[in-house]
Image (cartoon, rainbow, N blue to C red):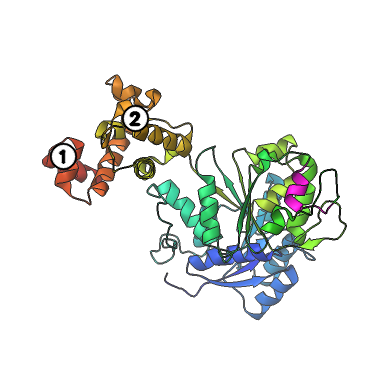
Amino acid sequence: MTKNNHTILVVDDDASQRQLLGGFVESLGLGVREAASGEEALESIERQPPDMVLLDVRLPGISGIDVLAEIRRRHPALRVLLITAYADLRQAVAALKSGADDYLAKPVDLDELRAAILDALGLAGRSDAWGAVEVPPLPDGFVCHSPAMRRVVETAAVVAPSDAPVLISGESGVGKEVVVQLTHRWSPRAEGPLVAANCAGLPESLIESELFGHTKGAFTGADAQRRGFFRAADGGTLFLDEIGELPLALQPKLLRALESGQVTPVGSEVPVAVDTRLVAATNRDLGEAVEQGTFRDDLYYRINVVELAVPPLRERRDDVLPLARRFAAEFAGSPVRLSPQAAQCLLTYHWPGNVRELRNAVQRACLLCRGDVILPEHLPPKIAAPAAAGEEPADTGRLSQVERATILATLDECGQNRTQAAKKLGISRRALIYKLRAIEAE
């Protein structure tokens, strides 16, 4: 990444948030300074004015709005971007009237933040202002061919080094737990434990004990002391799946544990310090749950510093065939391949069950396949139906996408050997070259 002379001051009382935003700013090739309070920020600006300030609204002591007013009095031209977890139109208008150059709400959308920073600094459109995020090596078998999934992986690479809580959202079966594992793998806590707990699967009467532990004799059946998930994840990452199912009565205790870094086991009055990074996942709209009163807004903003939204498989069609081949290699006793017709079935299906449904479909196909080729008839009937009926997809735009993905995936499978790929696709080599030229011209 090419460095330039611009410096941004990140002002936030949360160290993990400063670490996250600072790391993101550095990924843009910009210099970073940090301040944990409004007073510290003003002193830093007086010593050496930065080119821009990322300013949290809610700060101990002087509020972000008051800091903004003082910046405007002393340094009228200094660019200031306000960030807050409590976003509403009235506050946004007030902030802009107070002299903010822009306003972003938590959870911060990193693409939106990038655009705001580069635009404010006059770097938008410059080739050296933004390059691809440096992504660490992906684990074997991790599929990331689609642009939508690459964006998730790049965001995970930016978020992973910090201790900031992360919320991973997405439909059931999209592979949220795989993104959790990636975030942990790329974090400084990688050598520590990754402990998973499904909030929907824990008995409501025992969930506090499961999370925070209990002392011996704390309740009927507590025959021994239990550490709980938080303490089991000490030095590592705690993954709370389906956090939207956490009982409302327990949410304040989870919030207190996150803010204090301490848990109090059931049956004890002595808090225990824990060093745990929280990653949560949900297939529910927690913003809507907050509006309905089933999820606390303060907990929502605490766990949702950055949201990683994993797209559904229907929006990641470039990943379908690589995933299918990975699953086939996992389930088949001997090498198998997808016929072009079976591949088209997989690419045209809408996958309401996402990656989990694809995995199950390929497992079924491997069980029914007697040779080394998976045919449409080996797939579940609802997936093979278009091919069986000899139908073409009604959406011609989708057909173009399907054909493109099939060609590129087959070329990849054949090591870019066009003759072999054409043979597998059932077309002439000249026809394949013509189609590749059309793809390159897109």
Question: What is the x, y in percent for residue 368?
Answer: 34, 30
209 is within the stretch colored magenta: yes
Question: What is the x, y in percent for residue 319?
Answer: 38, 44
| Res 423 label | 1
Question: What is the x, y in percent for residue 311?
Answer: 48, 42
Density class for disc 1 (Cα within 10 Å; few <14, some 14-19, many ≥20) is few
| Res 381 label | none
- Residues rendered magenta in the picture: 206-216
Callout 2: SS: helix
- Residue lying at the far top of the rendered structure: 389
Residue at 72 percent of width and 73 percent of height: 40
Tag nearer the camera, 2 or 1: 2
Density class for disc 2 (Cα within 10 Å; few <14, some 14-19, many ≥20) is some
186 sits to left or right of 56: left
Marks counted in the figure total 2
> Does 374 appear above or below 62?
above
Question: What is the x, y in percent for residue 277?
Answer: 65, 59
Quadrant assignment for the C terminus: top left
Could you tell me the amino acid type at mark 2? Answer: Leu
Residue at 81 percent of width and 47 percent of height: 222
Quadrant assignment for the N terminus: bottom left
On the question of residue 314 being in view, the answer is no
Of 397 and 346, which appears nearest the observer? 346
Residue labelled with disc 2: 368
On the question of residue 223 being in view, the answer is yes
